[in-house]
Image (cartoon, rainbow, N blue to C red):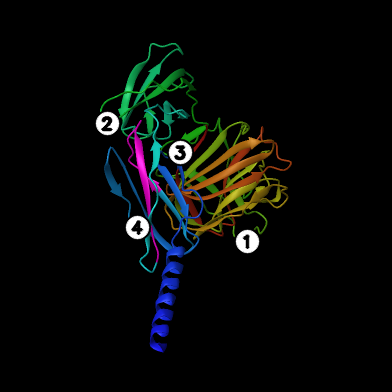
Amino acid sequence: MKRLSTFLFILLLMLVLSVSAIAQVQIIGDIETSLTENNEIFVRLNTGDPSMASVEYGVDGKFEQTAQKTSLTGEHNFFLSDLAVDSTYTLRVHVSDWSGNHIVSEDIPFTTPGLVSPDNVKASTRDNEARLSWSPVLGGAEYVIERANTADGPFEAVATVDTTSYTDSAVENEAEYFYRVSAVDAAGNKAAASAVLVVVIEPHLASTDFTSDLDMDFWRFHEHNPTAKVEIDNGRLVFYDFTPDSVAPDKKTAGIVNRDPIDMTGVTTVIEVGYSEVRVQELNLGFSDKIIHDDDPWWNNGFRLTGRGNSIDSATFDQSDVTISPSWNFPVAYPLDLRWELTHTGGKNFDTTIYVNGEQQHTGSINFGSLNPENMHFYFYVSESNDGFAAANYLTIYQE
């Protein structure tokens, strides 16, 4: 009798443990589903405890299943891509725990939208170029770009691409063009065209690969250091031959600055520069709201990016009330390509984005303080060369 009682106790304990284990694998709350801006079905669920999960999905009884994911928190997120348009999918979630218990959710229907054209076509311009871009649409295998000279057309197709961008080089500066984009699915079905986008081709503020002399109607020399040389040499802008500190300790900078002010309000101002060599303490890209000819810009109001021998960082000028958030310091090796974007967001506030060799390395914000963003000057200058040497092989300034 005692053995029977022990056996029943063990059986009851195993049953309790089994029920407990089963209780650990359950989906807490509803399974969330939605369509993301990247045209994927997003599936989210929570089991409350560590578990493994996958999603089975398909149309008309033809199913495929995602790889199984393990979550130590019990929260699972799935993104289902390569979906057909205007189709009703059936989704099922499979969940397992460490004890081998397994449950399958009820079927969840999800209907994808029909084929539509992009609703966010954007454009930026450069000299004799219109650069169009848009987000992908569900089912869009190709995109037809059409252009017209008036808003009412007639529109003519200028390109068909399988990407989400296109550069139209058959345009002229200062001219006005009208564009629309249509999505096409893999079967050749074409959606109604997007809204018409008007684009005025704005030329560069400045663009040079230093194969010819500087345009001195646009530039002037910044000559704080009387013996420094800033010149074009063999396709590069070169800074060299500075007065040593022992001779002129407070004469440290030289470079170029644009003569006429740049209005940076309401647009994105872009600086692109190719650094060849930096063997000086500082090779600076800077902004101030006045032309500083016989003084070091550092001691005035402004801000800059400073290229050093092995890094680039952000800084304000010494007398500046500009605020940069967050500060930025990035290790580099030369040569390199740098792109600096300053986007006006209202008042004295700008977003800043920095790319090095085509890859985004920083985002932040800048408040111009008492600087006048309608009246800015761009500086490209060397500081504290000490007989060093620096060179750049191109410089472009434009606004979007």
Residue at image coords 45%, 36% = 208
- Of badges 2 and 1, the one in the foreground is 2
In this rendering, position of residue 376 left or right of residue 12? right
Q: Earlier in the sequence, mark 4 or mark 1?
A: 4
Q: Quadrant of residue 194?
A: top left
Marks 3 and 1 sit apart, C-alpha to C-alpha, by 57 Å
> Crowding at label 2, few (<14), some or many (≥20) Cα neighbours within 10 Å?
few
Q: Quadrant of residue 52?
A: bottom left
Please report contact status of discs 3 and 4: CB closer than 8 Å, yes or no.
no
Q: Quadrant of residue 178?
A: top left
Q: Looking at the rendered structure, which numbered label has been put on residue 245?
A: 1
Q: Looking at the rendered structure, which numbered label has been put on residue 186?
A: 2
What element does badge 1 sit on?
loop
Q: Amino acid at mark 4?
A: Gln
- Of badges 4 and 2, the one in the foreground is 4
Give the residue number, with chain letter if any, for mark 4: 68
Q: Position of residue 24 (x, y in %)?
A: 46, 64
What element does badge 4 sit on?
loop
> Crowding at label 3, few (<14), some or many (≥20) Cα neighbours within 10 Å?
few
Marks 3 and 4 sit apart, C-alpha to C-alpha, by 24 Å
Marks 2 and 1 sit apart, C-alpha to C-alpha, by 68 Å
Please report contact status of discs 4 and 1: CB closer than 8 Å, yes or no.
no
Is 317 located above or below residue 110 in the figure? Answer: below
Which quadrant is home to the N terminus?
bottom left
Part of the protein shown in magenta: 79-97
Give the residue number, with chain letter if any, for mark 3: 37
> Crowding at label 1, few (<14), some or many (≥20) Cα neighbours within 10 Å?
some
